[in-house]
Amino acid sequence: LVKTGTISTDENAYPMKDMKFSVSPVVRCAVEPKNPQDLPKLVEGLKRLAKSDPMVVITIEESGEHIVAGAGELHMEICLKDLQDDYMNGAPLKISDPVVSYRETVEAETDQECMSKSPN
């Protein structure tokens, strides 16, 4: 099973639909093992964490940083504690400060004309 599934002994059971969440992972932390020899444990632990929690998003940046994204600081704290204690058998981690993604959007068209200079 990956993230969701329906387990039943009834032959006529219908599969349940995936849950749709109204929140998205906005808090991000970079994690790395304190001991470089624990890197395989970290990679395996991140895979297990991603399977166990449908709200966690794990990414690897071009620089090689492992990024864990969650729905809030408390959610991140719980996930990182589970990662370290349960999925990595207590191997110590270096965890960056939480970063919240800032997002903007255009809501309406303006009737004003704006000019700007570009350095290009």
Image (cartoon, rainbow, N blue to C red):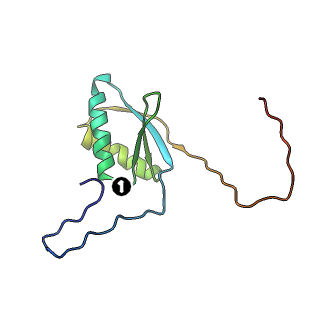
Q: Position of residue 64 (x, y in %)?
A: 42, 28
Nearer to me, 14 or 100: 14
User: Residue 70: x and y, percent?
Assistant: 44, 49
Q: Residue furthest bottom?
A: 12
- Type of the residue with mark 1: Pro
Say few, some or many: other residues with alpha carbon within 10 Å of mark 1 (under 14 / 14 to 19 / 20 or more). Answer: some
- Comparing 113 with 7, the one in front is 113
Q: Is residue 84 visible?
A: no
Q: Secondary structure at mark 1?
A: loop
The residue where tag 1 is placed is 54
- Across and down, in percent, residue 28 comes to 48, 43
Q: Position of residue 37 (x, y in %)?
A: 28, 23
Is the N terminus in the top left, top right, bottom left or bottom right quadrant? bottom left
Q: Is residue 109 left or right of residue 67?
A: right
What residue occupies the far top of the structure in this picture?
A: 36
The residue at the point 87 percent across, 51 percent down is 113
Q: Is residue 7 left or right of residue 117?
A: left
Residue at the (51%, 50%) spot, across then down: 26
**Count of numbered circles on the image:** 1
Q: Residue at x 17, y 69 (%)?
A: 8
Q: Nearer the viewer, residue 31 or 110?
A: 110
Viewer-closest of 84 and 25: 25
Kindly identify the residue that appears in the image at 31 percent across and 34 percent down.
42
Q: Is residue 32 visible?
A: yes
Work out which quarter of the rendered image holds the C terminus and state it.
top right
